[in-house]
Image (cartoon, rainbow, N blue to C red):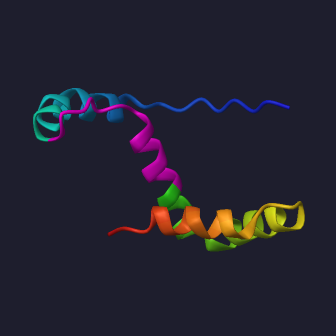
Amino acid sequence: MTTVVEVDVTGIARLRDREKAVFHARTGMKLSFPPFFVAAAVGALAEHPVINLATVRQRLETGFDPAALHQAQVELEPT
C-alpha cells in the first residue's frame, strides 16, 4: 500500500531560497527540504503524544526493537 499526500511547500521553498546562501556560508552544506519535513514531523508528534504513543505501541507489539526506539529518541532530543 502506498499513501501520497500533496502539500503546498511554497512557503518553505521561499524560505529555503532566501536562506540557502547564508546557510551554505555558515555550514558548508546545502540547505535541503528534508530538515523542514523532519522538524514538522517531530513538532507534530510532540504536540500530539497520544498518536505518538499509539505508534510506539504498535511497533513494540509487532517486534520493533525497543533499544532502537530509545536510540532514535535520544538522537532527536535537542542538545
Give the residue drawn at x 53%, y 60%. Answer: 44
Quarter of the rendering containing residue 56: bottom right
Provide the residue span drawn in magenta.
Answer: 27-41
Q: Quadrant of the N terminus?
A: top right
Q: Position of residue 65 (x, y in %)?
A: 76, 64
Q: Position of residue 39 (x, y in %)?
A: 43, 52
Asked whether residue 37 is drawn in magenta, I would say: yes
Residue drawn at 37 percent across, 28 percent down: 10
- Give 64 or 48, whichever is nearer the viewer: 64
The quarter holding residue 68 reads: bottom right
Given residues 6 and 26, the one toward you in this image is 26
Would residue 7 be counted in the magenta stretch?
A: no
Residue at figure coordinates x 50%, y 58% from the top left: 42
**Quadrant occupied by the C terminus:** bottom left
Query: Which of the 4 image quadrants contains residue 48?
Result: bottom right
Left/right of residue 57 with respect to residue 24 in the rendered view: right
| Nearest the eye: 63 or 35 | 63
Tally of marks: 0
